[in-house]
Image (spheres, helix red, strand yellow):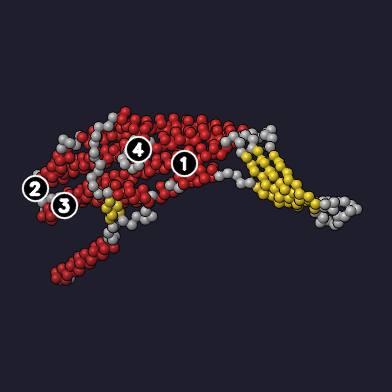
Amino acid sequence: MSRSQARARRLRVRGAGLVLIWLSGQASAAPPTPVEAMRVEEAVDEALGHNLELLARRYEVPLARAEIVSARLRLNPTLSFGADHLDLLGTHYDNVNHAGPEEFFVRTDWLFRVGRKRKRRIEVAETGVAVAEQRLRDAVRLLVRDVQSACVDVQAAAAAVELAEVNRDLYARVVALNEVRVANGDLAKVDLTRAQIAELQASNELRQAEGAQRVASNNLALLLGRTASAAAIFVTGEMRADARPRALAEIQARALRERPDLRAAHGEQRFTQLDVRRQIAEGKIDLSVGVEARRQQGLAGTGNSLGFFVVVPLRLFDRNQGQIERSRQQAAQADQRALAVEQAIRFEAANAHVAYEVARELLASFEGGMLARAERVLATAEYAYRRGEASLIELIDAQRAHNDTRRTYNEARAAFARALYEIDAVTASGGWQ
């Protein structure tokens, strides 16, 4: 084989390799995912209007109001028609057997409830509406907290992707530089391999960060009530950082005063207490009063008569003892639940205050310029490496220090934002009412 033929063969092989690389890149390249930008406030508004779980919970209030309608209704009277002693079996009433007479009647009965049963039912139903409203407000409170936290997760994931891209680009520049140095004989191939391994690791970290960003976007889309997350959600604006000194006593006092779940627990106490009174009233005897008009049609003559009736049940055995005891036990249970909710609120306030203080102190540690110094160290190390005055190990160490510092800073910002939103949720504030 001549030298020109060998050269032509190498060119054909190289060209075929470039075509295969391009085709594989086209095959693996996925279409860009559409991105939808929104602010935290917009996400909260959309969730309040479209979250499927909240939409289902909203029915609890009209369901409770329907119980008031049922409680206010009075019992319907009954109307009876009858025919008695009819000559239908072949007796043939006559003056010999003197059977009969045939009778026809119409009767109406009213049940009169005593013991203020209707009033007790209305009281229980009205209290149930108040409890349902407070539970709905608490569901809104929790949803707002979850949406705000999910928005912080999206922002933190975006910051992680940005940091991973910086690392990937840094090692891409190092690999490109080392390829030139190896080609010129100025660098050992093992250093190029190390740089390529570092670039591969940075690329993998970028893929993981992008996957975490997509998961965070999907979680937010679920809270927003979207049936499909076709577009990735990008939360605009900076993470919340409106720092204001918040004392634990202030947080606890406001939480105990404003929390809808505690109000619902207190409403449940009143609900069960009223239900005890209702069940006691249900044990009282009810009277049934009836009026009857009767027509007699016989051989001796015809006649009309009027009758009055009073029916009194004899409560010898069932006096509603079971329901009375059940309601009393539920009242005791409601008292314990109210105490449990109050205790949980106190600990939630304490935990929120601890998270706030830790995040604030951690974020304050960066105010001395730690992040800027880490960036300058990395820039200096890269510059020195390009000039051949620093080794690859020194550059990697500087990159890791910068990466750890930047990651800690991003986590501190996210933790501080979550702590602020958590305090709003614990104290039932933030304007979501």
Q: CA distance from mark 2 to mark 3?
A: 14 Å
Pointer 1: what residue? 129
Q: Nearer the viewer, mark 3 or mark 1?
A: 1
Relative image position of residue 269 (x, y in whole percent): 48, 33
Q: Residues within 10 Å of mark 2 (few under 14, many from 20)?
A: few
Residues under numbered marks 3 and 1 in contact, where contact means CB atoms less than 8 Å apart: no
Give above or below for 14 relative to 278.
below
165 sits left or right of 272 in the view: left
Relative image position of residue 177 (x, y in whole percent): 13, 52
Give residue 428's mark: 4
Q: Earlier in the sequence, mark 4 or mark 2?
A: 2
Pointer 3: what residue? 173
Residues under numbered marks 1 and 4 in contact, where contact means CB atoms less than 8 Å apart: no
Pointer 2: what residue? 387
Numbered disc 1: secondary structure: helix
Q: Residues within 10 Å of mark 1 (few under 14, many from 20)?
A: many
Q: Earlier in the sequence, mark 4 or mark 3?
A: 3
